Image (cartoon, grey):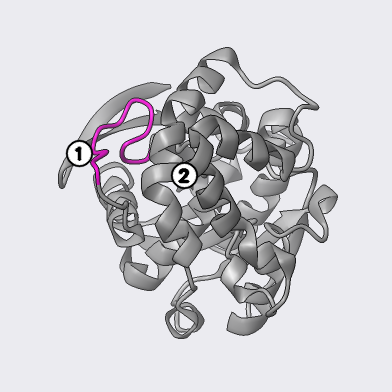
Amino acid sequence: MRSGRLTVDGAELYYEVRGVGPALLMISGAGGDAGYYSGIAEGLADAFTVITYDRRGNSRSTGGDDGPMELARQAADARDLVGALAGGRALVFGNSGGAIVGLTLAALHPECMLGLIAHEPPAVNVLPDGDPGRGFFAELAGLYAAGGAPAAGRRFGETTRGEGSYRWPADLWKRFLGNADHLFGREWPAFAAFHPDEEALRAAPFPIVLGAGADDRGTYYALPSIEIARRIGVPWVEFPGIHMEFLRHPSRFAAAVRVLATQMYAADGKVPDLWRGAPEAP
């Protein structure tokens, strides 16, 4: 693994690069930390150049400020990383808020993408009127205003299936706690207001796949993926496990991503030389 910092407009973004092969940019959700994907990145590094990063204002990246963090800014950061580290185009995977950033990137900067895998974007505004999930962001914003990050964070954990059933890496947990005010105070409004640009996504010149975990059926953060896929006319797939299965069982989640990402890269029959392997004598 090699790490570094990329200077972008108003920030320095901490990044990590592992492996060889076609580029795969992975965008993390709440907490915005590259460490979410350390295990899965190691599991994919024999087939992909896996790029992970701390989103602006989170963990080891700079650029947090006192104003709301716009999704267009987050998408521009991802575009700049692809330009600097992947030769201008990459396959993108995003989980949760990272999937929202990925959908925004696909709509605003399609030229930098070879495909998008959006795993459980909590785009609650696409849920039907009256669905209790539509009030999730407002509820946590109220808790944050009344009791700060601890109150909002506790409720966040309570609504996410599987949390508490596995251990987070200690360093990642520490950084996540340090990012909580940035999440609830600055990133939350943009995530709460997100509506996918359905026209732009339908017109995307690359494959888009939405998906959610098998253990998350019926949740407010899984159901939007099905609705978005239906609206824009793209495939939907079921992944193994929970919202953060890549932390609980990284090898299992990596296997699922490998199959999907390989198919998206090689659907036209142009298999990268790396994947062909060296000829073997009969």
Q: Secondary structure at mark 1?
A: strand
Residue 10 belongs to the span the image colors magenta: no
In the rendered image, the quadrant that contains the C terminus is top right
231 is higher (above) or lower (below) than 46: below
Q: Give the residue furthest to the front.
A: 146
Counting from the top left corner in percent of width and height, residue 87 is at 28, 50
Residue visible at 53% across and 21% down in the picture: 172
246 is higher (above) or lower (below) than 266: above
Q: Amino acid at mark 2?
A: Ala
Q: Which residue is mark 2?
A: 145
Rendered image: mark on residue 165: none
Q: Which residue is mark 1?
A: 11
Residue visible at 61% across and 38% down in the picture: 279
Of badges 1 and 2, the one in the foreground is 2
Q: Which residue is more in the foreground, 263 or 118?
A: 118
Q: Which residue is more in the foreground, 181 or 78?
A: 181
Counting from the top left corner in percent of width and height, residue 12 is at 22, 34
**From which residue to which does the magenta span run?**
55-66
Q: Is residue 142 visible?
A: yes
Q: Amino acid at mark 1?
A: Ala
Question: Decide: marks 1, 2 in contact (CB < 8 A)?
Answer: no
Q: Mostly what secondary structure, the magenta segment?
A: loop
Q: Reading the chain from its start, which is encountered first: label 1 or label 2? A: 1
Q: Is residue 265 visible?
A: no
Q: Which residue is more in the foreground, 48 or 4?
A: 4
Counting from the top left corner in percent of width and height, residue 269 is at 58, 65
